Amino acid sequence: MEREIKFRLRIGDKIVGYERWYIGDGGISHWEYLEINDTVWRPTYIYHTKKDQLTGLLDKNGNEIYEGDIVRVQNLYETEEPVDAFLCKVRCIDNWSYEVVDNIYTDSHLLK
């Protein structure tokens, strides 16, 4: 059985592309890269210095949530709080509403 693992690629706080790996039963099957503003995944390399893994969650607008994203959480009590996406994966409940508002690399003050 093959599964996909996806990363957002960065240089500092700038997103430069995406990478996805397909893992098969015998290990890594293959990987592909997607440049910003492109729609075609290619088996080429995009230079990057950091990568954030996809959490497997989508926000209320259908946007993928990556490690390092800051999401606004609206819980059952109708209150909102910004929280790091990793913490959300640990703490959030499925019927809560969350929305990506930024990431910790460009706006870490939102977590204070």
Image (cartoon, rainbow, N blue to C red):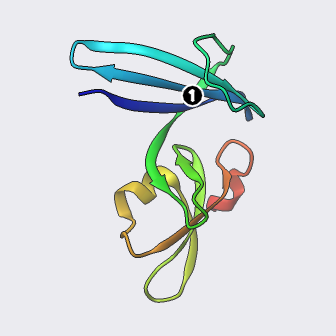
- Quadrant of the snapshot with the C terminus: bottom right
* SS of the residue under disc 1: strand
Q: Is residue 66 left or right of residue 11?
A: left
Q: Which residue is mark 1?
A: 51
Query: Eyeballing the image, is 54 above or below 50?
Result: below
The image shows residue 104 at horizontal and vertical percentages of 64, 47
Residues packed near mark 1 inside 10 Å, few (<14), some (14 to 19) or many (20 plus): many
- Quadrant of the snapshot with the N terminus: top left
The image shows residue 95 at horizontal and vertical percentages of 39, 75
Q: How many discs mark residues in the rendered view?
A: 1
Q: Residue at x 44, y 23 (%)?
A: 21
Q: Tell me, yes or no, if residue 10 can be seen here.
A: no
Q: Is residue 53 left or right of residue 46?
A: left
Of 90 and 97, which appears nearest the observer? Answer: 97
Query: Eyeballing the image, is 85 above or below 46?
Result: below
Of 74 and 45, which appears nearest the observer? Answer: 45
The image shows residue 47 at horizontal and vertical percentages of 69, 13
Q: Residue at x 60, y 56 (%)?
A: 70
Q: Amino acid at mark 1?
A: Lys
Quadrant of res 8: top right
Quadrant of res 92: bottom left
Of 38 and 102, which appears nearest the observer? Answer: 38
Quadrant of res 87: bottom left
Q: Residue at x 57, y 28 (%)?
A: 51
Q: Residue at x 63, y 10 (%)?
A: 44
Q: What residue occupies the far front of the structure in this picture?
A: 40
The image shows residue 76 at horizontal and vertical percentages of 43, 85
